[in-house]
Image (cartoon, rainbow, N blue to C red):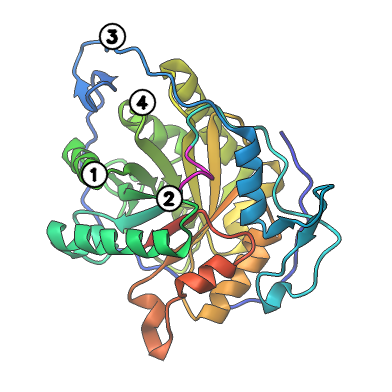
Amino acid sequence: MKRKIFLANPRLWLAASILFFGTVIGFGFFGSADISTGTIANGVKSLFVPPKYPPLDKADYDLRLDKLAHLLPIDATNTLSIIPASSSTSTASTTRLWPVATAYPDDGAILPFKRVVAYYGNFRSKGMGVLGEYPTSTMIAMLESEVAKWNAADPETPVLPAIQEIAITAQGYPGPDKKYRARMPDSDIEEAIDLAKAVNGIVILDVQVGQSTLEDEVPTLAKWLALPQVHLAIDPEFAMQPGQIPGDQYVGSLDAKDINWTIDYLANIVKTNGLPPKILVIHRYREHMVTNSQDIETPPEVQVVMNMDGWGTPGGKKSIYYSYIYKQPVEFTGIKLFYKNDIANGSTMLATSDVMSLKPTPIYIQYQ
């Protein structure tokens, strides 16, 4: 489904991300997924019959989208009023961008019935996020504290914790196949699945393609994506053109056609395995990171989250969110909060109240 999107030409503060290098490790790709146990049955087809998921409550779905968009019913005719989210959106607009007109998701959809709060990183690096920075017990305690905070901020939207592991990481050297990316071993993804189970959450596998492509990298995760609790994220920042090196002066880009290929791939996995909809998170903090976003498709099998990924001052982050998330709608929205980079140079991290006031309110919160 294609939607008309109104583009903006802002002058903005821009953020940068920190890249740390990984080790090139071959990714095994054997066997099939047994989604009854959450383990991999090497060489043996699963006989598991997927459960029936709760039917979609369309009325509840619509009301929750209106709430995220700061729309409230004001009379018996259900006329809607636009509620400004911040000073940057202080004037009600006659052009309604949110909620976006998309197809209803399939049964068992997570969004917008739950808010995903994700802890992000790579188990092999202390510098890429909280997953690798802290001992497991400390990290889980921190995540549970954030879950409680967001549950208190919006009691009507239960929080679903997520372990977001960078399963394919860009790197500053070419590696054996000269793709400037490293695929993490199966054991890392198994660790993410175990951690997610420990916190009653989901897994999001993050992909940074380097000089490779989504078509080459995403299928290496197929056996994991066939599990109902495993979802996907893609990071255009590290999608390089020939001659560009990740972590150098370049900020990469993905076009809607690349993203739509990934969406179709996930949709086929959902249909083939009888799964509930997959979540696809797309990182963004500059306009060129996602080109032709108005052409991104949102089929019933995939729920697309555009995630504002940049770090900096609260004002700068709100400005980017307004320009590249609010004004270029796709389906759902998210925001990344940085424990360290957001508070650099005496700044502060956005409070839960600040995030809740954003329009639309993010349904996905990521911590690095």
Q: What segment is highlighted magenta in the picture?
A: 110-114
Disc with the residue nearer the chain's start (1 vs 3): 3
Tell me which corner region of the image, top left, top right, bottom left or bottom right, holds residue 297: top right
| Foreground disc of the pair 4, 2 | 2
Q: Amino acid at mark 2?
A: Pro
Residue bearing mark 1? 192
| Foreground disc of the pair 3, 2 | 2
User: How busy is the neighbourhood of tag 4: few (under 14 within 10 Å), some, or many (20 plus)?
Assistant: many
Q: Is residue 112 magenta?
A: yes
Please state which of residues 15 and 97 is positioned toward the viewer in this rendering.
97
Residue bearing mark 2? 158
Disc with the residue nearer the chain's start (1 vs 2): 2
Q: CA distance from mark 1 to mark 2?
A: 22 Å
Residue bearing mark 4? 226
Q: Are marks 1 and 4 in contact (CB under 8 Å)?
A: no
Q: Looking at the image, which residue is at 75% across and 64% down?
A: 8
Left/right placement of residue 359 relative to residue 54 reads right
Q: CA distance from mark 4 to mark 2?
A: 25 Å
Q: CA distance from mark 4 to mark 3?
A: 13 Å
Q: CA distance from mark 1 to mark 3?
A: 24 Å
Mark 3 lies on a secondary structure that is loop
Mark 1 lies on a secondary structure that is helix
The x and y percentages for residue 157 are: 48, 51
Disc with the residue nearer the chain's start (4 vs 3): 3
Does the image show residue 25? yes
User: How busy is the neighbourhood of tag 2: few (under 14 within 10 Å), some, or many (20 plus)?
Assistant: some
Picture disc at residue 332? none
Q: Amino acid at mark 1?
A: Ala
Residue bearing mark 3? 47
| Foreground disc of the pair 4, 3 | 3
User: How busy is the neighbourhood of tag 3: few (under 14 within 10 Å), some, or many (20 plus)?
Assistant: few
Q: Looking at the image, which residue is at 36% across and 28% down?
A: 222
